[in-house]
Amino acid sequence: MRISPGRARILGLTANVFFLGIVSFLTDISSEMTLTLLPLFLANVLGTSTIVIGLIEGVAESAASLLKIGSGWFSDRWQQRKILTIIGYGLSTISKPFLFFASTWHWVLGVRFADRLGKGVRTSPRDALLADSVPAEERGKSFGFHRAMDSFGAVLGLGVAALIVYLSQKGAVDITQASFQRLVLVGIIPAVLAVLVIIFFIHESKEKKDKVNPPVAREIPKHKNNGLFTGMPTRFKIFLGIMVLFTLGNSSDAFLILRAQNIGLSTFHILLLLVTFNIVYALIAGPAGILSDKIGRKTLIIGGWTVYALIYLGFGMASTPWVIIGLFVAYGIYYGAAEGAGRALVADMVPAEKRGTAYGLYHGAVGISVLPASVIAGWLWQSINPAAPFFFGAGLAAMACIGLVTLVK
């Protein structure tokens, strides 16, 4: 008799949570090798402007966000999370090899668009599947583990990328096309393995009843109307609005990478910096998730956003590589504290039968906001100076903190 994926335990985690962590671990190895250095490839090899780089990142993320809403809603109606997760990861895996042939920014936009479409299809059903697989009191721990595995994958992927870049071009500031193509080829392998893990080791959860819901979710009546916001509590809608405000100042991390190079760090040193960031993120995410189960998600998110505002002020004022290194370490603390807690908070706020839709709305609100955020950041960088996007982001983060404290009860 097959053990229910909601009951089987591996290292104290349900089987689905453990293997979803492995999937994210493998996927991030691939993504960090192939996608993290795209901004440098665009700027150094293809000569693309920062406005276009911001447009590429924003268009890709916003298009994916629309799918996150649709895929989350569909997974609720269909009650099938796994198939959509496989399709999403599969689409991203198929798209990445085409970066090997990229010769114009239009080609990169097409590949980035396809990769993000895959992310759009999989993200909401995957997060709902994870939430379905655990009791309410373990959500913070489970999402924290998932975020930590994601970051450990990034550490390994960036470490391998740094080794390839070092062997290919030593300490050169700009990345070369040959180095980037090698990264793409090696990065395909873990992406394929991730899809295979989903197919063979992850099972559709059948435990989606009120027993895994917090009390607030049980108090929400069911509705016959299946609209996106039907049955969603008011505080969840307010939380989405605050997330949009925060994200408008949280442009693509491509600008953090460009800022590091702008201060004088080489491609190799930027990769080491990203490894450090992800190590900190991975070490913080698990304990932070457990902490959110004890002190509340909102408190942790507010703390994370406060750190974020200070970090962005630092990026705006930075003038030496040593300052950038310290800021990237602090950035890992922010991500570790706020990312998993935010996802767990969504599950706390909504009824079980609306989780897929809720995650779709959450990821959609964030992702759609990335387009204007990245375009604004690119414009501020080019029209004013490279520090301007970071001062703008710090201001909006401070406003979002105030909104979360005063409006979400």
Image (cartoon, helix red, strand yellow):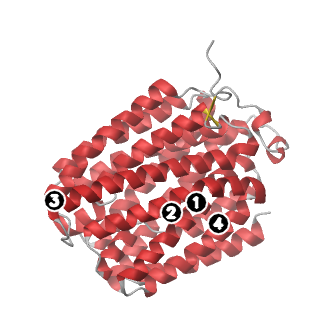
Within-10-Å neighbours for mark 2: few <14, some 14–19, many 20+: many
Identify which residue is drawn at 34% across, 46% down. 30
Residue shown at 28%/59% (left/top)? Answer: 162
Residue 360 appears in the picture as rendered:
yes
Q: CA distance from mark 4 to mark 2?
A: 26 Å
> Can you identify the residue that label 1 sits on?
284
- As measured in the structure, the alpha-carbon distance from the residue carrying label 4 to the one carrying label 3 is 44 Å
Q: Residue at x 43, y 55 (%)?
A: 61
Which residue position holds label 3?
168
The C terminus sits in image quarter: bottom right
Q: Which residue is mark 2?
A: 280
Determine whether 57 is above or below 9 in the image. Answer: below
Among the two numbered marks 1 and 3 on one chain, the one whose residue lies closer to the N terminus: 3
Residue 242's mark? 4
- Relative to 11, residue 52 above or below: below
Q: Label 3 is placed on what type of residue?
A: Ser
What is the C-alpha distance between the residues marked 1 and 3? 33 Å
Which numbered disc, 2 or 3, marks the residue that appears first in the sequence? 3
Residue contact between numbered discs 2 and 1, judged by CB atoms under 8 Å: yes
| Residue 357 percent location from the top left of the image | 62, 43
